């Protein structure tokens, strides 16, 4: 059973959506957002990676889930399974630094010995914004946006793993930050219809929106030729679509609200959101290259594959 199949199975026994499974975080008590992410050695990070970057990535992935729902992170529970080789003092310092960076409090958790390397887990609690952002709200006619360019996380990971030599830092993917401020902004305004964070990959995560909303999403390949990816040449769009753990936000907005959202986004965050595609009637997520359409709903990372 693949990862997304397992999640779908769990969704059948969860509570009613959106309080059940289906989004980046779950709504709890009508006010709170709660999400959980785990990180395992040799799956999400290498033992050789600096502990402060590993811990920062754990915090980032969790904060990103709250941002994708338009909420603000508040508190977290931290779980640590460590072997005798883990520098616990350094781990504690890293957790304190990351919590301060994102403005959240560690309110509890659990610790255990581990026979299989370092294992980290976090449950994060946030407060929903005025507008709860779900994956299920996109409508035909909406515009598709990215909060920032994507693609370099895959580049950095490939360099760290020795897959390809790229002009990028091998640890850069650990240093990605969550779009905390962008999430709060998007959850406070009208006109945003759906959102997700780019954790599995742009194709897969936009595909989640398409599936949950019952629509077709088309991404323009030319709009993915970000300056940061120039060195990839013809592969730029492919990397942008398949790069996971970017923690950017992909979101849809009503067409008649797009200009206002773009203007206010830039005014608030000092940069413009990137218009990358459109929503129409139909199903699936597709990459448009010239006149060709390629299904990309499964272009991203999946555990248990």
Image: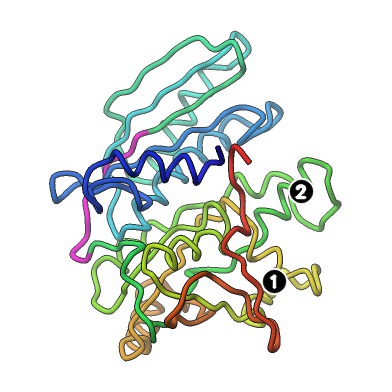
Q: Nearer the viewer, residue 142 or 36?
A: 142
The residue sitting at 32% across, 34% down in the picture is 76
The residue sitting at 33% across, 83% down in the picture is 254
Magenta-drawn segment? 123-131
Instruction: Report which residue position mark 2 lands on.
Output: 158
Is 125 colored magenta in this rendering? yes
Residue 66 position in % (x across, y down):
34, 51
User: Disc 2 versus disc 1: distance between alpha carbons?
Assistant: 16 Å
Mark 2–mark 1 contact, CB under 8 Å?
no
Q: Please identify, in this view, whether the residue under mark 2 or under mark 1 is nearer the observer.
A: 1
The residue sitting at 63% across, 65% down in the picture is 241
Residue 179 position in % (x across, y down):
43, 58
Question: Disc number at residue 64?
Answer: none
> From what the image shows, is residue 271 above or below residue 153?
below
Where does the C terminus fall, quadrant-wise? top right
Instruction: Report which residue position mark 1 lands on.
Output: 237
């Amino acid at each position: 059973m693949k990862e997304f199949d397992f999640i779908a199975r769990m969704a059948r026994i969860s509570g009613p959506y959106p309080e059940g499974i289906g989004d980046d975080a779950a709504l709890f008590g009508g006010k709170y957002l709660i999400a959980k992410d785990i990180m395992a050695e040799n799956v999400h990070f290498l033992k050789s990676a600096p502990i402060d970057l590993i811990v920062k990535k754990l915090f980032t992935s969790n904060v990103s889930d709250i941002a994708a729902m338009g909420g603000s992170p508040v508190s977290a529970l931290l779980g640590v399974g460590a072997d005798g080789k883990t520098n616990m003092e350094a781990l504690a310092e890293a957790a304190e630094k990351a919590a301060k960076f994102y403005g959240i409090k560690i309110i509890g958790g659990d610790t255990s010995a581990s026979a299989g390397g370092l294992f980290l887990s976090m449950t994060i609690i946030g407060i929903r914004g005025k507008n709860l952002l779900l994956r299920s709200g996109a409508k035909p006619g909406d515009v598709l946006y990215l909060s920032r360019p994507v693609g370099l996380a895959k580049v950095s990971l490939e360099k760290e793993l020795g897959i390809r030599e790229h002009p990028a830092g091998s640890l850069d993917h650990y240093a990605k930050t969550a779009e905390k401020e962008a999430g709060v902004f998007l959850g406070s305004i009208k006109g945003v219809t759906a959102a997700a964070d780019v954790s599995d990959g742009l194709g897969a995560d936009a595909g989640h929106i398409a599936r949950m909303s019952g629509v077709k999403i088309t991404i323009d390949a030319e709009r993915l030729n970000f300056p940061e990816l120039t060195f990839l040449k013809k592969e730029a769009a492919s990397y942008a679509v398949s790069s996971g753990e970017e923690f950017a936000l992909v979101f849809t907005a009503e067409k008649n609200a797009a200009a206002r959202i773009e203007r206010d986004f830039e005014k608030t965050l000092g940069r413009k959101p990137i218009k990358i595609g459109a929503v129409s009637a139909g199903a699936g997520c597709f990459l448009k290259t010239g006149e060709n359409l390629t299904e990309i709903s499964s272009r991203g990372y999946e555990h248990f594959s």
